Each structure stands twice: as structure tokens, then as C-alpha cells.
Amino acid sequence: MRPYRTVFNRQVLNFVADADEDIFVEIERWVNRIERMPATPGDYTEEDEDHRELQVVVLQRVAITYWPDDAVREVRVVRIEANLEN
């Protein structure tokens, strides 16, 4: 079975490209986990303008908003924000 892959939109890609090494490593570890287990629920859910359920996972230094696109076996990351609490 073909594994899932992670897809970033332009805003997310820019965030990752500009991230310091610690944040980059944190995101990379999450990507490795979510590609193996794409159905993993986030810490809470949101709904986008298309009424799609988005998962939000809060890591140590970032919050990642995503949804698994099972039809094409991709995890679509739609937003990454710095976790300002840490």
C-alpha cells in the first residue's frame, strides 16, 4: 500500500522555510508520525469554509492544522502557527 505524503500550502511552506532549527525538527517529527498514522486525531477540530473537519495538533512550539485526504493518500497542512504559550 502506498504511504501517505504531506502537502503544504504556500503560507505553510514559507513558515517552515523561515523556522529555526528547533521548530523545523519538531515539524519534521510530526510529519514522520502523521504520514504513518494519518487518521490520528488532533487535540481539537475546526471547520473550514467548505465545512471540512480540520484537525489541530498543538505541539511544543507550533500548532498545525491539517486534514487527511484519503482519496489521494495525502495529509494536507493548511496552517502552522507559532505556539505563543511556549
Image (cartoon, rainbow, N blue to C red):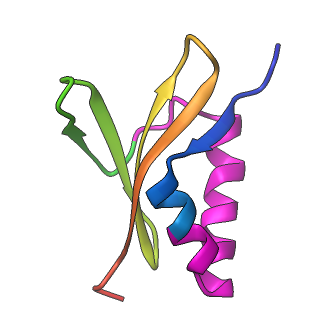
Relative height, residue 60 to residue 86 (above, below): above
For image coordinates 72% across by 50% down, the residue present is 32
Q: Position of residue 15 (x, y in %)?
A: 50, 70
Q: Main secondary structure of the magenta part?
A: helix
Q: Is residue 46 left or right of residue 35?
A: left
Relative height, residue 82 to residue 44 (above, below): below
Relative height, residue 8 to residue 76 (above, below): below
Q: Which residues make up the magenta segment?
A: 15-41
Q: Position of residue 26 (x, y in %)?
A: 62, 71
Asked if the magenta segment contains residue 26, the reply would be yes
Asked if the magenta segment contains residue 28, the reply would be yes
Q: Position of residue 70 (x, y in %)?
A: 55, 16
In the depicted view, which residue is nearer to us: 49 or 36?
A: 49
For image coordinates 45% across by 79% down, the residue present is 61
Quarter assignment of residue 46: top left
In the depicted view, which residue is nearer to us: 7 or 14?
A: 14
Relative height, residue 12 to residue 41 (above, below): below
